[in-house]
Image (cartoon, helix red, strand yellow):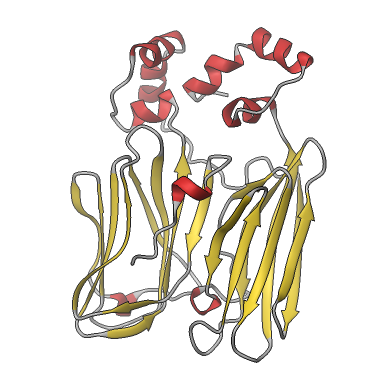
Amino acid sequence: MGTEIDIRRVLKYPPECFVASLPTDLSAGTNKVAEYIGFENAYIICLQGLSFSPYDGLKFRASADKVTDAVKMDDLGAVRGLDYEESVKLPAVRLLTLYLDAPSAVTAYQWRHRVAVFRPTVAMKLQLGLGLSDEERRLADKYGLDNLLRLQTPVPYDLYRGVEEWRTQTVRATSSGTLLRVSVPQGKKVILVGISATRPASPASGYLTVDRDDVSDVLRLDPYCLPSLSYDSPIRVVALDKLVIEWEQATSGTYRFRIVYGIGRVTVPEKIAWGLDLTRAERELVEREDLFDRVRAGIA
């Protein structure tokens, strides 16, 4: 079984960005350690972050759609370590597969990866060279998206977009319990943007679980693979009702965690993108500003 995230189950308010932080037992040779498959036009998945424990002779490869070994790292003895991320940006619409090639068997290898997940707008599909439906072509022509992409490079999505207030929670735990529980104020959103921990000496000492709204175990993280308290692995998990982070402790000891989240208003374009109900005043604004089409096109 790989370490991939169950995108279909956990995605709720895209764009969102999830981190997989679980150690992996490797056999000698090629190991498929994560695979995302079969999303077609429903989602665009982008591999955005990789972190590895340095290990001489170990190799990493990632293939996207029809491109084999689109990303290659020939010796993980030269990586920066778990307290950092290796730079990568690799989008896929049909298939994303991650491999670790090991010179010999490795038990509980420490590594993690991040994937951002988008529902594709017309602008995104044009940028990636994907086919458009007749309706999408109408929107592309309406807003001149082809020429717009010729004139400028799209700005990468900001994972902290929409944050108006910041909060940091620091916790010391010696037993299982709730590390964070936030009830989201009416008309607001809470965005979980970072988790770090003191790494235990061994795997499976405990697990962090993130629940939001009506989705449980959005993330299930082993701190053995997380960054230390000096670095946050950037993520984006949005909650409109509640955000709860639990610690399931398996081995006695003292554990320390740092959690960062933001608070912001829910905007009208977000309501459209997420299929939320609009007030009468918001519907009038949508019609006046042509927001339904602008959101679908990717320019609102």
Q: Residue at x 39, y 45 (%)?
A: 45
In this rendering, would 204 be left or right of 167? left
Q: Residue at x 46, y 34 (%)?
A: 119
* Quadrant location of the N terminus in the rendered image: bottom left
How far from the left and from the top, in percent, is residue 94?
A: 29, 41
How far from the left and from the top, in percent, is residue 142?
A: 45, 8
How far from the left and from the top, in percent, is residue 31?
A: 24, 70
* Quadrant location of the C terminus in the rendered image: top right
How far from the left and from the top, in percent, is residue 68?
A: 18, 52
Q: Residue at x 64, y 91 (%)?
A: 252
Q: How many numbered discs?
A: 0
Q: Quadrant of residue 4?
A: bottom left
Work out whether 141 lies above or below 12: above
Q: Quadrant of residue 5?
A: bottom left
In this rendering, would 185 be left or right of 71? right
Residue lying farthest to the right in this orientation? 185
Work out whether 152 lies above or below 28: above
Q: Quadrant of residue 283?
A: top right
Work out whether 120 lies above or below 88: above
In this rendering, would 196 be left or right of 189? left
Identify which residue, 132 or 72, lies in the foreground.
Answer: 132
